[in-house]
Image (cartoon, grey):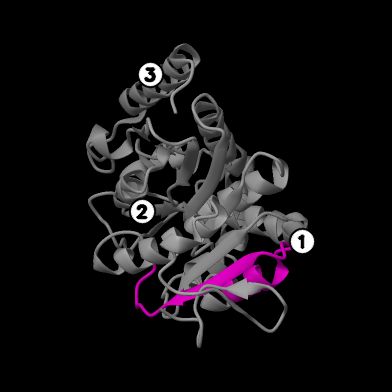
Amino acid sequence: MLADASPLSILLAAEEALFAREYQQHFNENDSKPARIGKPVFLPSHTSTWGVLLVHGLMAAPEEVREWADHLHEQGFTVYAPRMAGHGTSVEDLNNRKAEEWIASVERGHRILECCCQHIVIAGFSTGGAVALQCVIRQPDAFEAIISISAPLRFKSFSANFAEPVNISNRFISTLGLKWPQKSFVTNHADNPHINYLRCPISSIVQIKHLMRRVKKDLATINIPSLIMHADHDPKVDVRGGRELYRLIGSSIKYYQEVCFHQHGIVRGEIAQQVFKKSGDFLALVRGRTDLIAQPISPVQDGSTAIQLSSARI
């Protein structure tokens, strides 16, 4: 339930003002989307003390997870989808951002939900899933559970795998003041071009890789209920990374689900309904509402549990 609205209103207004300022500062007619795409999403519930902090992916914006937010809100959750720094503005803005700034954006979102929720779950898609994992590692007592979907532990693309040497070359050229050409961006074959930037900064890929190394090292410290999901034919992020994340998470209450799909993006469109249903089952379990779970929970070989029964796919 909404408690003291004053601190909540102040924090919400601050985030909206920050976005308006940065959108105006970095607007580029070639890269920027309409402002409504990048605006943080807040959907309050007046009947529940549970909230979900919902984190979008790289080169995207809160609009990417809007369908998920609406679904969660219909289930009775208060939902806040923050805008990570450098997103919803321009790709040039993103090019100058660090992973720590993305994390700070999400941690501010957590403070917003603390104003109106007693129980908070963090959920994220793609890079948002990685940031969600890192937030739990940094604040182990701040969240009741985590949902990480398609977190990029292993990349498939050539450009992603060679991002770090290219980034070193770019920095070397800049440091020496040479006039040699630099490769600062690669084409983004976006699942949602009306939301995503159509170019990806090499520096951002490097930031994700560094972040995932940190996350992987500390996954064993995560001890809250965890759901890991991934598309089995994801063309951008290797599904084996999702399986590895599941194995390495320290929680004894953890779940793994593969979705039969051929794209990276699985939180919008028809396929998303399956994802929402499975994540809803997980959240019902976390809240102790086992009567809402569509399928029973069964054990898997390592002694933890899995939502899917006979296989790891929807």
Q: Looking at the image, is mark 2 or mark 3 earlier in the sequence?
A: 3
Query: Which residue is drawn at the image coordinates 35% and 78% (left, top)?
Result: 262
Q: CA distance from mark 2 to mark 1?
A: 34 Å
> Could you say which is closer to the camera, residue 163 or residue 123?
123
261 within the magenta span: yes
- Bin the neighbour count of mark 2 within 10 Å (Cα to Cα): few under 14, some 14-19, many 20 and up: some
Quarter of the picture containing the C terminus is: bottom left
Q: Secondary structure at mark 3?
A: helix
The magenta stretch is 242-264
For residue 292, side relative to residue 110 (left or right): left
- Residue 60 at x, y = what percent? 37, 48
Q: CA distance from mark 2 to mark 3?
A: 26 Å
Whether residue 265 is visible to the viewer of this picture, yes or no, is no
Q: The residue under label 1 is which amino acid type?
A: Ala
Q: Name the front one of labels 2 and 3.
A: 3
Disc 2 marks which residue?
A: 199
Q: The residue under label 2 is which amino acid type?
A: Arg
> Could you say which is closer to the camera, residue 175 or residue 263?
263
Query: Which residue is drawn at the image coordinates 56% and 72% (left, top)?
Result: 256
Q: CA distance from mark 3 to mark 1?
A: 38 Å
Q: Residue furthest front?
A: 291
Residue 272: quadrant of the picture:
bottom left
Disc 1 marks which residue?
A: 220
Q: In this rendering, is residue 83 above or below 129?
A: above
